[in-house]
Image (cartoon, grey):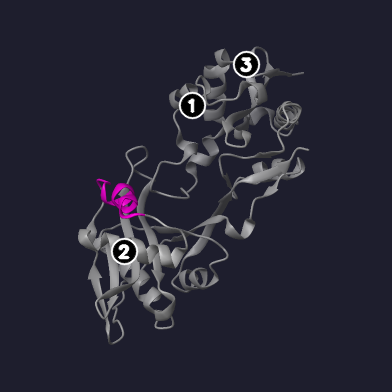
């Protein structure tokens, strides 16, 4: 029978190899986002560096070993509210044997003894990982704010369409001196504040930033609607991690009802098609019902949901 042992940093290389091999099946899945390489594609060398570093919480991390090698592991890292799960994984040949659950149970007990009130998954869980969802549910975890979870929607085919904006509305490309006003409008639409530097650092500084993909709608000289799209090729897996990602489509409340959002998304899709950048993905949340309905009407379908799970410990 495998032994459940506390994680020690000298196990880093062995556990990194286990994690990398256990996620092989997921590396063929469509990425849930393109702006940054997804964690599932992390090379074994990078995993080993994290496992050997100070972010891992050894007191709450446990490994199942058999024949001197790791066959399952539940690794926790230190977070603001205490330890949180970073990776939970099992050798495919040893699945359905309760090893991951036993490692988690040992970690939860250690966290409980340390006075921790709640445990969460620090890394988000992809809804396509049905085994992960089943494991977490069996151990009493539940999705954290499910209506606010992120969902990835994907469109694979597109035929360009003509776009005509209503009288009084003008479509323009975002200019750098528009960024302060763009940031203010974005904050009003999406409900969280960001400064112009955020846009400059997150988007304009990217080597694949193309201003022609970022559009604004003006009414009487003021920005009332925004949208953006990036054509992305990632060196890590260029054959699969490519396409376009739509960002921050929205219209101020007082200008809704004129199909401005639909026209902006249509322009984004025309732009992506013209740059051979299909499929197109976007991220949204289920509570944004009008947006989800709009995307579905244009041909987008939900690819996956991804969110954290939580469990009370006391």
Secondary structure mostly seen in the magenta stretch: helix
Residue at image coords 49%, 25%: 50
In which image quadrant can residue 94 be found?
top right
Q: Residues within 10 Å of mark 1 (few under 14, many from 20)?
A: some
Q: Residues within 10 Å of mark 3 (few under 14, many from 20)?
A: some
Question: What is the x, y in percent for residue 135?
Answer: 71, 40
Q: Nearer the viewer, residue 100 or 29?
A: 100
Judge left or right: residue 19 versus residue 294. Answer: right
Question: What is the x, y in percent for residue 285?
Answer: 53, 61
Label whose residue precedes the other's in the sequence (2 or 1): 1
Q: Which mark is residue 267?
A: none
Q: Nearer the viewer, residue 213 or 202?
A: 202
The stretch of residues the image draws in magenta is 195-207
| Structural distance between the alpha carbons of marks 3 and 1 | 17 Å
Q: Residues within 10 Å of mark 2 (few under 14, many from 20)?
A: many
Question: What is the x, y in percent for residue 151?
Answer: 53, 57
Residue 157 in sight in this render = no
Q: Nearer the viewer, residue 120 or 235?
A: 120
Residue at image coords 40%, 49%: 34
Query: Disc 3 on helix, strand or loop?
Result: strand
Judge left or right: residue 77 versus residue 278. Answer: right
| Structural distance between the alpha carbons of marks 2 and 1 | 38 Å
Query: Disc 1 on helix, strand or loop?
Result: helix
Q: Are marks 3 and 1 in contact (CB under 8 Å)?
A: no
Q: Which residue is mark 3?
A: 69
Verify whether residue 198 appears in magenta: yes
Q: Nearer the viewer, mark 3 or mark 2?
A: 2
Q: Which residue is mark 2?
A: 182
Locate the C terminus and report the quarter of the image it occupies: top right
Q: Which mark is residue 47?
A: 1
Q: Are marks 2 and 1 in contact (CB under 8 Å)?
A: no
């Amino acid at each position: 029978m495998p032994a459940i042992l506390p994680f020690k940093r000298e196990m880093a290389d062995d556990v990194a190899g286990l994690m990398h091999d256990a996620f092989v099946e997921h590396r063929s899945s469509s990425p849930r986002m393109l702006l940054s390489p997804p964690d599932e594609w992390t090379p074994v060398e990078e995993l080993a560096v994290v496992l050997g570093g100070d972010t891992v919480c050894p007191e709450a991390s446990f490994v199942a070993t058999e024949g001197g090698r790791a066959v399952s592991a539940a690794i926790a890292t230190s977070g603001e509210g205490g330890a949180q799960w970073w990776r939970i994984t099992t050798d495919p040949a040893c699945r359905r044997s309760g090893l991951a659950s036993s490692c988690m149970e040992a970690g939860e007990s250690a966290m409980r003894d340390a006075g921790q009130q709640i445990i969460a998954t620090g890394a988000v869980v992809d809804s396509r990982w049905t085994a992960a969802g089943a494991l977490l549910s069996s151990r009493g975890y539940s999705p954290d704010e499910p209506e606010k979870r992120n969902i990835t929607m994907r469109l694979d085919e597109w035929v360009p369409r003509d776009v005509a904006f209503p009288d009084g509305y003008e479509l323009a490309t975002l200019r750098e001196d528009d960024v302060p006003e763009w940031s203010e409008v974005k904050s009003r639409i999406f409900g969280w504040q960001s400064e112009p530097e955020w846009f400059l650092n997150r988007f304009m500084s990217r080597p694949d930033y193309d201003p022609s993909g970022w559009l604004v709608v003006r009414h009487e000289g003021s920005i009332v609607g925004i949208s953006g799209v990036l054509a992305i090729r990632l060196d890590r897996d260029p054959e699969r991690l490519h396409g376009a990602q739509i960002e921050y489509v929205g219209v101020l409340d007082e200008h809704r009802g004129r199909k401005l959002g639909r026209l902006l998304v249509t322009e984004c899709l025309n732009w992506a098609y013209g740059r051979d950048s299909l499929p197109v993905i976007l991220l949204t949340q289920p509570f944004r019902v009008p947006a989800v309905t709009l995307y579905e009407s244009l041909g987008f379908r939900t690819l996956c949901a991804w969110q954290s799970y939580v469990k009370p410990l006391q």
